Amino acid sequence: MERVLIRDLKAHVGEEVVIAGWVDVRRDQGKMVFFDFRDRSGMVQGVVLPKSEAIEVAKDTRQESVVAITGKVNARPEKNVQADRQNGDIELEVLHIEVLNAAETLPFDISGDTSGIDESVRLEHRYLDLRSARMQKNMKVRSEFIRRCREFLFGNDFTEIETPLLTESTPEGSRDFVVPSRLNPGKFYALPQSPQQYKQLLMTAGFERYFQIARAVRDEDLRADRGFEHTQVDIEMSFVNMEEVMNTVEAMITKTVEDMGYTIKEKPFPRISYKDAMEKYGADKFDLRTEEEKEKGILAYAWVVNFPFFEKTDDGKWTFTHNPFSMPIPEHLEWLMKGENIGDILTTQYDLVCNGYESGGGSIRAHRAEILEATYKIMGYSKEEMENSVGHMLKAFTYGTPPHGGIALGVERNIMNLTSESMLREVQAFPMTRGGQTSVMKAPKPLMKKQLDELSIEVKKAQK
Ligand code: ASP
């Protein structure tokens, strides 16, 4: 018999069916045994009657075991109907239980909220944690958000293009994760902090509208809303100004979250300058919701614009605040080119803020070599250092690169807002611990001598 999904059982009242899934709960009442069975589509109550041939097996079948159940779908008598529950008006009379995989007693209870359980225990058994209703929901919200963004972008003439994972160390502002090269002893790749340069090169390549659901890897100190790895909805567009990128992203976010059933506080999204935001909220990310709106799960988006392009480092040099590849606002281009009024130059950066988080950011880019050179000159790069760092970009810009700009939306921060989670790891399937330990598997760990030799690497000082 073909497996029926639990959500479809209603259509089979009076029939014998087979379902397959997990034992969510077992209630042994002596003569009879009750179960809640769970599959990806939902939950149904099963009952094993005293005369059933399944009664012995039923008494032995532990919670979270995987079973295939042959049973008869019965309508519940009126007085037993639980109108507020899925399948509250039916019941599966269990005729036969096939245990496909028996479960040992779980290391922790997954029937409620698992967020209070010790992090290392949760992450060591993440595949169990992910079975909990809350984590199932979070992963599904994440999948749906990405699907809807994709659909919007495909519907608006974007092309999805993947960019390399093994790439060159780039000046994105954080520490790189590096990968040794076996074929080039002593040389290293870096994992991408973002596809920034490749997506700009795709504009040079004439794709005009690019997107990618991209992984970004940064060796930063871990925080509640920050991990080593995160995912971005990464977008780049040719022949656009700030307005056009912001409007496209605003339309995508609005359609995506409203179609998912959420309410947006204010449309179009309010826009505020960095200066005003700092004066009003003391930060460039802020929460515009009232307490009541917070309870209702309302989303309050806003754009922050007119950020300073440069800031001083501790050693008195200028560095970029957001993105070295940005264009200044048109009124300040001359200052940038001449290296004047550096602290006053504003960049075309736009940040999307939602409920207190920076949920995205991007800018219009310098698409002419002399503009990017002027930025690097302000940051104190010599011609040679510039060549070494962004020579390939400067070169590409000499072969017909259209004006372009883009943005990256942080998937996790967006999902945190949609699910009201305050920890990044609650919206990633296999996150790391606070100490940078992988879920389930045991990275980072030492390499074997043979591997190190192959890579021409000698470990100077093993940690602890
Ligand atoms: N590459 C930038 C980032 O990852 C986003 C962008 O400007 O598109 O933050």
Image (tube, rainbow, N blue to C red):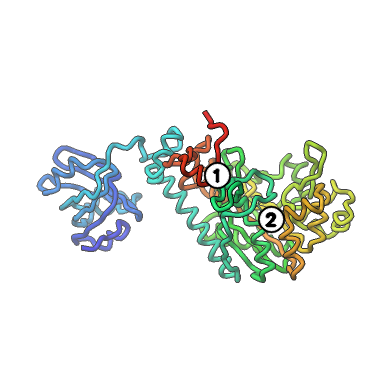
Q: Is residue 428 above or below residue 316?
A: below
Mark 2 or mark 1, whichever is nearer to me:
1
Which picture quadrant has residue 264? Answer: bottom right
Is 209 placed left or right of 74 in the picture? right
Indicate the amino acid at tag 1.
Answer: Ser
Local SS, label 2 = strand
Give the residue number, with chain letter if any, for mark 1: 456
The outermost residue toward the top is: 464
Q: Is residue 254 above or below residue 85?
A: below
Which picture quadrant has residue 406? Answer: bottom right
Q: Determine if residue 168 is in view.
A: yes
Q: Is mark 1 within 8 Å of ligand 1?
A: no
Q: Residue at x 60, y 46 (%)?
A: 186
- Pick the residue in front: 308 or 381: 381
> Marks 2/1: CA distance?
39 Å
Give the residue number, with chain letter if any, for mark 2: 362
Local SS, label 1 = loop
Quadrant of the drawing holding the N terminus: bottom left
Is 332 placed left or right of 364 in the picture? right
Q: Is mark 2 within 8 Å of ligand 1?
A: yes
**Which quadrant contains ligand 1?**
bottom right
Q: Position of residue 260 (x, y in %)?
A: 51, 58
Q: Determine crowd level at label 1: few under 14, some 14-19, many 20+ residues with C-alpha closer than 10 A.
A: some
